[in-house]
Image: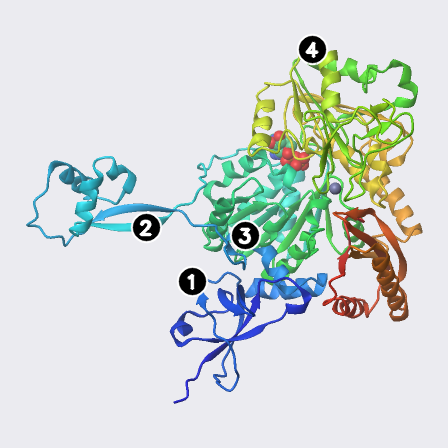
Amino acid sequence: MEVILLIVGVLVEISAKAVDKVFEYHVPKSLEKSIKVGIRVLVPFGNMKLVGFVLEIKNEKTTTKDLKEIISIIDKDIVLNKELLELGNTMKNMTLATLISCYQVMLPKALKAKVNNNVSIKYDIFYKLNLNYDKTLKFNSSQEKIIELVSNNKVLKKDLVEISLSSLNTLVKKGVLIEEKCEHYRLNYENEKKDNKILTSDQEKVVNEVINNSPNTYLLHGVTGSGKTLVYMEIIDYYLKKGKTSIVLVPEISLTPQMIERFKSRFGNNIAAIHSSLSDGEKYDEYRRISRGEAKIVIGARSAIFAPLSNIGIIIIDEEHSDSYKQSDPSPRYHARDIAILRSKYHNCSVLLGSATPSLETMARALKGVYKLLEIKNRINGNLPKVNIIDMNKEIKKVRGHFSLELIDKIRERLEKKEQIILLLNRRGYSSFVTCKNCGYTFKCPQCDITLTYHKSSNTLRCHYCGYGEKVYDTCPSCKEKALSNLGIGTEKIEEELTSIFPSNKILRMDYDTTSKKGMHEKMIDKFKNHEYDILLGTQMVSKGLDFKDVTLVGVINADTSLNIPDFRSSENTFSLLSQVAGRSGRSEKEGEVIIQTYNPDHYAISLTKNHNYLEFYKREMNIRRQLKYPPYYYICNIRVKGKDSKYTLNEAIKIRNSLERNFKSTIILGPNSSSLFKINNIYRYNIILKYKKEDSLYLVLSKVLDHYKNNNKIKVDIDFNPSQML
Ligand code: ADP
Ligand code: ZN
């Protein structure tokens, strides 16, 4: 007799161009009822067993094909719904990543297609009374106590075990009690507290504009301290009351408990917060609350844009200029802003981008009318802080360590008033490295060709790319002289200097090293808020999102380092960093001040921060971008060719360039050049950079390049559209 079987198309977990397609399998009769599009299944693949997503179910039942059978079904409920399935396809076309990588990036670890994915659901076990139990049974006293407890409602196992485990077991065995398993979410949220601030008229105008118009993409350009967060919350509240859901994206480093607290205290259990300090289990719990519709507002970093909400009313991206919204590595190299706009089309809702210093790309679109521009020009308290720029060239004789006398005086003034201070050590593009004063030798990572960074606490030199480490020598390995010096400054060094200038004050250092332990970042912010410290010293981490009412002075130790990064966005990044950190000062009643120490006081990215003049900066920078054919006038695409054999890799890169030249009409092609991160983990990297306005065959030609190398294991080609950094 002929057996007729169902056929499914499965996309397996391996992310490689060569296998990035749907493979067909038969569904055994016993599993037919449970098979659905969007769930995971285990399938045989070569001589492996792999997990994959079911992407299609074919109606033609046939046995003419010789197919393998799926082994088992993993999910009861759908993991990838219709919207996400479609979105994955669009992302693949936009980024040229593999389809499987697009789906994987949307999901928490627990739901990714992956063999041995050990993230589990936690359960609470309850017992309740079986109303039909045998009434002739006799009980001892602890058994009676248990029965009394459960007679009205179900009771947690742990409370019954306390009375007597053996009695509990006996009652279960005799059918008096029924066990019930309930999912237990690891996180718990407090109840709502009403935040009874009244909107200012500026805030109200923005809120009304967004909720009263048909769906659009808005840019809210609001100075620091203009109350953007309250605007977001009002809009979210409006949609919540209409039964609609919301997504709020914030950069990871400003996703502090302070931020989450503001949302939680207003929206209580409607909030799901997804951030990197959650465990995989906690992330899975949050994800289930979202997909079940129990959480209606999702707040999170980049990947929260994929939250499986239905009926979305608004998508908000705070600090929209942040480069953390672009995933650089691994692929898919997507931008959360693009995904937000795609999802808004599906849900017919608005997107609200907010920033005090919007990216040039976004501002240009807003000024052209592609996005709708909304502005708040004034702070809630009326005053932006006064900014003083200190020319360090003139201060050389008067400095103590890295501190100008003026900065020291200002710090002292604030300390005397019991106010607080934030100091930024700009480490962007900067590292503290060791060099030989005699012969100029610098220590580099043998695997990455990157200058090693000095870590005082462990007295080691470490590579920030691959983690390679070595002990510090006292003689130079090249000239054998005892002439090594620690040239750079790190936060530790600045902390030392500060302590010697202000020995009786408490200094809190916040950087990558001091916050790497889970929960430390949160604790530090709490302690600073409670005035356990006077001065908060840190890297970029102190520049965003913080809102302390007693901080009245912000000092920037070195404004310049980020100007020297070989990247066309270095001015923009510097201006926005300085504006953001300046914005931490004087946010409440007390007037704020900012001191910026620099060796380039006349550079426009620095001088224009003095009057918080974003628009002037925008004009100047746009001019340069136009002249040099950079975004937003041109699009950029970086093609990275990587391989172990430097010569072979370069040769292939040249071949790629030549073929692009033959195929493109109007695109400017630069390179191949060795990347500024030339050698990472013994892999050499060459970049080919494309600048284009419109190139019809762009995606087609680049897909062919990727296809050409899909089975070549000596070369890997990465494509990054609109790269956030040129690495
Ligand atoms: P931004 O995100 O624009 O930098 P925030 O939303 O953090 O600004 O607001 C700055 C400060 O002003 C916060 O301490 C906030 O609580 C306060 N604030 C915001 N809106 C109002 C309002 N309408 N009335 C009183 N205080 C407000
Ligand atoms: Zn390295």
Residue 439 % position (x, y): 92, 29
Q: Which sits earlier in the primary sequence, circle 1 or circle 4? A: 1
- The kind of residue tagged 1 is Lys
| Residue nearer the viewer, 65 or 393 | 65
Q: How is the image coloured?
A: rainbow
Q: Tag 2: residue type?
A: Lys
Q: Is residue 655 left or right of residue 206?
A: right
Report how far apart the C-alphas of labels 3 and 4 lie in the structure.
47 Å
Q: Earlier in the sequence, mark 4 or mark 2?
A: 2
Label 4: how many Cα within 10 Å (few below 14, some 14–19, many 20+): few
Circles 1 and 4 in contact, beta carbons < 8 Å = no
The residue singled out by tag 3 in the image is 108
Q: Please tell me which residue lies in front, 626 or 665.
A: 665
- Residue located beneath label 2 in the image: 181
Q: Residue at position x 45%, y 62% from top?
A: 74
Whether the residues at callouts 1 and 2 have beta carbons within 8 Å, the answer is no
Q: Earlier in the sequence, mark 1 or mark 3?
A: 1
Identify residue type, mark 4.
Pro
Residue 390, visible in the rendered structure: yes
Marks 3 and 4, the one that precedes in the sequence: 3
* Residue lying at 60% horizontally and 46% vertically, measured from the top left: 248
What is the C-alpha distance between the residues marked 1 and 2? 17 Å
Residue 503 numbered mark, or none: 4
Q: Earlier in the sequence, mark 1 or mark 2?
A: 1
